[in-house]
Image (cartoon, rainbow, N blue to C red):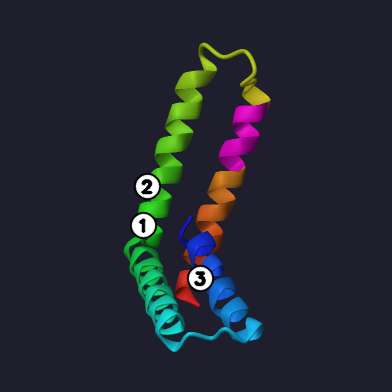
Amino acid sequence: MMMQAAKKMSELIISNIESGNADIDSITKCSDNLCKIMKAAERIANTVTRATVIDVIIALDRWIVERSKTDSNLTPELVDTITNLHRGYIEHITENELN
């Protein structure tokens, strides 16, 4: 959502400049808003740590196992595949953190 807003702001700035109707005040306002959007996105990205991602994946795995008790679509093979992929992803982001 935030990136869509940033894209729209960028497009608005470019279209104002390209149209020749470049009102410096509106371009400045759009630029300021774009900077605010990008700063907010950066702040959000920095608050989601690898530990948080790992916690969410583990919670999701537990939920999938519980759900598989009542959902016939979640076969034991599918649950194993999903949890193995999740473990692999956790290993991947942990290795990248160390490198």
Element carrying mark 2: helix
- Residue 8 percent across, percent down from the top left: 55, 66
Q: Is residue 15 left or right of residue 5?
A: right
Q: Which labelled disc corresponds to residue 51?
A: 1
Q: Amino acid at mark 1?
A: Ala
Q: Amino acid at mark 3?
A: Met
* Crowd around label 2: few <14 · some 14–19 · many ≥20 (10 Å): few
Q: Nearer the viewer, residue 30 or 76?
A: 30
Q: CA distance from mark 1 to mark 2?
A: 6 Å
Instruction: Please say whether residue 83 is one of the residues in the magenta stretch.
Output: yes
Q: CA distance from mark 2 to mark 3?
A: 35 Å
Q: Residue at x 62, y 22 (%)?
A: 76
Q: CA distance from mark 1 to mark 3?
A: 33 Å
Q: Is residue 85 above or below residue 71?
A: below
Question: In front of the other: label 1 or label 3?
Answer: 3
- Tell me if label 1 and label 2 are in contact, CB under 8 Å: yes
Q: Is residue 32 above or below residue 85?
A: below
Q: Nearer the viewer, residue 30 or 25?
A: 25
Q: Is residue 67 above or below residue 29?
A: above
Q: Quadrant of residue 13?
A: bottom right
Q: Nearer the viewer, residue 14 or 51?
A: 14
Element carrying mark 3: helix
Return the residue at label 2.
55
Span colored in magenta: 78-84
Q: Residue at x 46, y 60 (%)?
A: 2
Q: Amino acid at mark 2?
A: Asp
Return the residue at label 3.
9
Instruction: Please say whether residue 87 is one of the residues in the magenta stretch.
Output: no
Question: In front of the other: label 2 or label 3?
Answer: 3
